[in-house]
Image (cartoon, rainbow, N blue to C red):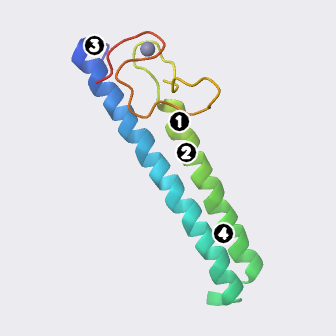
Amino acid sequence: MARTGKNTVVEEFERRRARMLRSFGACMLLIAFSLCVTQIADSFPGLFGIGRKGWMAFAAAQFAAGVVFALMGFRQYRCPVCHQIPRAHDKYYLGVAVDPEKCPNCGVRLR
Ligand SMILES: [Zn+2]
């Protein structure tokens, strides 16, 4: 498992990047879906015998799950060598580098 070849770093980082993008996608879907649920609960109170409060709790749970997905994807999105999250160049912006060529911390090639 502890292979440190150049290609394995690139492959491992690509895997983590794909996982991060998937969890962000899941986050967006869950949050969009939770907003739909609140709309539906407003328009059709008592749908399926579940009251507005029940639907709101359901929507809140989905929203929370979406945030958890995003955090999980973000937390595992690290350089396989130095285990730092590759941040975008702008230090005043809390974004991550979504497609970095090299690790901004240790300089290892990630593509
Ligand atoms: Zn690194």
The answer to whether mark 1 and mark 2 are in CB contact below 8 A is yes
CA separation in Å, label 3 and label 4? 44 Å
Which of the two labelled residues, at mark 4 and mark 1, occupies the earlier sequence position?
A: 4
Mark 3 crowd level (few <14, some 14–19, many ≥20, 10 Å Cα): few
**With 105 as the anchor, is 111 left or right in this view?**
left
On the image, numbered disc 3 is attached to which residue?
Answer: 3
Q: Is residue 68 above or below residue 3?
A: below
Q: Is residue 98 above or below residue 58?
A: above
Find residue 74 and name its label: 1
The residue drawn where x is 66% and y is 68% is: 59
On the image, numbered disc 2 is attached to which residue?
Answer: 70
Amino acid carrying label 2: it is Ala
Which of the two labelled residues, at mark 3 and mark 2, occupies the earlier sequence position?
A: 3
Residue 44 in the image, given as x and y percentages of width and height: 66, 90
Mark 2 crowd level (few <14, some 14–19, many ≥20, 10 Å Cα): many
On the image, numbered disc 4 is attached to which residue?
Answer: 58
Ligand 1's image quarter is: top left
